Structures are given as structure tokens and as C-alpha cells.
Image: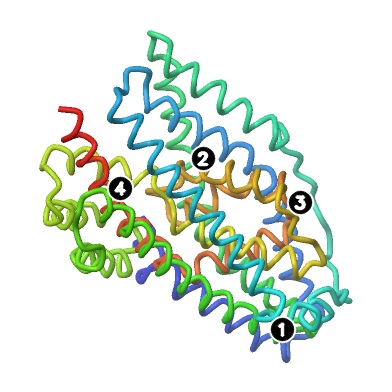
Amino acid sequence: MLKKIFGWGLLPWVAAAIMAGIVCGLFFPDWLVRLFLTFNGLFGQFLGFIVPLLILGLIAPGIAELGKDAGKLLVFTVILAYGFTLFAGFFTYGAAALTYPWVLDVTASLASFTQAPELTAYFTLPIPPFMDVTSAIIFAFVLGLGMAFIEGDTLKKAMYDFRAIIYKVISAVIIPLLPLYIFGIFLNMTSAGQVAAVLAVFAKIIILIFIITLVVLLIQFGIAGAVSGQNPLKMLGTMLPAYFTALGTSSSAATIPVTYKQVQALGVREDIAGFTVPLCANIHMSGSTIKITACAMAIVLLTGGELHFWQFTGFICMLGISIMAGPGVPGGAVMASLGVLQKMLGFNEEMLGLMIALYIAMDSFGTACNVTGDGAVSVIVNKIYDKTK
């Protein structure tokens, strides 16, 4: 669907939107900038309206699909994948908390970033959501767990249809309009004199995230190597075809055939690989968690906030669950995280827009980390399975 709309995928359009916003911000007249600010205001209101529905439509069916008769192997795989995801989030928090204060030059960036823009939208149209984010999260968990344990499937079918509607809204409305929305954000930043500081921060964050993903992968395969008695570096080398395939596709699902083949090359049984690879493509989100956590921390600092450990502890734990609903949807992980960002970190519409832009700018690196780490999870599950036979 995405390629039918954009031809090359979303990333080139987002990059073009950022560059166009910067260039146009240098000469666009105020009345035209205000026109795009009006669109951004309306689109931001729509995002606020749709976020609780995204939470409900993505998370509840995902929980229901796990089912109550999952079995020990499924439970162990889910716990291991979630544990790897949490580790990635907390490792990122520690690395970013240590490096951001001097790498990002937050004080100088903050002065530019918080400069009050002079221009405003022509009008706004409030679109209040059906429920707040907290209610949506709790309702999604209650509904998902309930559907997993009841005998009937009428409600499940209805929720699967509702999820299909949410997928359609994301792919046919939100994703196509995102480049225009991001264009408006950078147009406004340029006209307000903020863009130089923000772009400098973008570049540094992307480099740091790439380094963190490599370190996390080395640790994951170090653990897998210790469990299986294999050389971690050789194991990681075996998974490189999956890594580079994910770089090109930006999709865990599209990379499954390659991941499956390489996981078997690591010595994982065919039946175990056939079980863990598709499952981990949906629940193992180390790379996505690294990106979202690092970007969120940077935006919090740039908007004058502080990195409170316990606040981010709750955020990372909830993030690891919510983004399981994201695979298969373009930008799905960041879309599924919008509610958590809004509720737990206090993100407003502009901050969410920056979050989306940052995430998409390095989408393939996170996906590559996710699918490569699936190999480590599969090796560990395979070893545990052999011991319990």
C-alpha cells in the first residue's frame, strides 16, 4: 500500500519534506506559512483524536491473539523477547543520560528550540477524543485479555475488523499526510529561526542510536553464545543477510524468509525457527525501543524537561508492550507509542510530530536490529527446548 502511494516508500518523502520545509521557510510569505500551520493544527487535532483508537485497535487484538493455551514455549519466548526489549530500552536510557548533556549541547539548542514562533494558524478546530489515553490503555488490556480467555469469537472478529480499519486509517490517511505535516513543522521552525539547532540534534541522535544498536546486538549474541556454546561474532555474522535485508525493506514481516533461513544456519531446529521467527517479528522490538527511547529523551531535554529515571522506567515498560502492536504497519511502532508518549511523558502535538520525523528518518536501522536480535532469541529458545526434552 505504501509503495503504491509513494513509489519509493516513506523515508525519501520525509527527507524531501524536511529539506523543502527548510528551504521554503527562508522565503515563504507569512500568510502562506500560516496556511500550513492551519493544516498542521487540524492534522494535530486529528492525531489527538485517533491516538486512543490506535491504542484500542492495535493492542487489544494483539493480546487476544496470544490466547490462553499458548504453552510454555510461547510464554518463555514472549518473556525472553520482552526482556531483551526492556534491556535495550534501559541501556539506551543509561547511554543517552550520560552522553546527551555534552553531545547535544542542550543549553544552546534549548534557547533556539523554545523560541516562541510569531506566526499562528488562521483557525483551529478542536476534535476531542472519545476517551483519554489512560482509559484507552486500560480498556485495551482488559478487552484483549478478556477476548483471550472467553470461548466465543464474535467480539474477536469485530475487533479484528476494527484493527483493519485502524490499519487503513494509518496507511491511507495518516502516512500519506505525514510528509505534508512534517513539511509544516520544519517550515515553521525555519521561519522562527529554530531549524539549525534541531537539525544538529537530529544528526547526533542518529549516530548515537546506530552505535547503541550495534552494542545491544553484541550483548544479545553474547548471551546467546554463552547459552549455546557458539562464537557470538560468528553468529552475528551469520545473521548479516537478515540485517541488510531489513535495512532495505524496513519491515520485519518482509524479512521473515531471510531471517528464517539464517536462524536455521545458526543450528536452530526447523520447527523452532518456524515458531520463533514469525513470533519475534511481532514481539521482539529492541531496535524500535532504542529509537523511541533515545528520541523521546532528546525531545524532553530540548523542550526544557528533565530525564527522571522512574518516569522513564514506567515509559519503557509500557512502551515494550504497546509497540508489539506496530509490526506490519508503516511506522507502526511509533504510531503505537504515541499514546504512551503523550500520557507518560507529556508530549504535545509538535513534540509528537518531531518524534515521528526522527523515528522514520532511521526506521530501517531499528528494524534491522529487531530482526537480527530475533536470531539470538531463537538460539536461546532452541537450547532451552533441547534441555527440556
* 256, above or below 195, in the image: above
Q: Position of residue 80 (x, y in %)?
A: 38, 41
Q: Position of residue 103 (x, y in %)?
A: 65, 81
* Mark closest to the chain's N terminus, 2 or 3: 2
Side (left or right) of 114 relative to 335: right
Q: Nearer the viewer, mark 2 or mark 3?
A: 2
Q: Nearer the viewer, mark 4 or mark 1?
A: 4
Q: Residues within 10 Å of mark 4 (few under 14, many from 20)?
A: many
Q: Position of residue 363 (x, y in %)?
A: 45, 65
Give the amino acid at mark 4. Val
Quadrant location of the N terminus? bottom left
Q: Which label sits on residue 377?
A: 4
> Image quadrant of residue 265?
bottom left
C-alpha distance separating marks 4 and 2: 17 Å
C-alpha distance separating marks 4 and 3: 33 Å
Residue occupying image coordinates x 20% and y 28%: 388
Residue occupying image coordinates x 69% and y 29%: 135
Q: Secondary structure at mark 4?
A: helix
* Mark closest to the chain's N terminus, 4 or 1: 1
Give the amino acid at mark 1. Ala
Give the amino acid at mark 3. Gly
Residue occupying image coordinates x 56% and y 59%: 292
Give the amino acid at mark 2. Ile
* 48, above or below 386, in the image: below
Q: Which residue is mark 1?
A: 197
Q: Which residue is mark 3?
A: 346
Q: Secondary structure at mark 3?
A: loop
Q: Which residue is mark 2?
A: 321
C-alpha distance separating marks 1 and 3: 22 Å
Q: Residues within 10 Å of mark 2 (few under 14, many from 20)?
A: some
Q: Secondary structure at mark 2?
A: helix
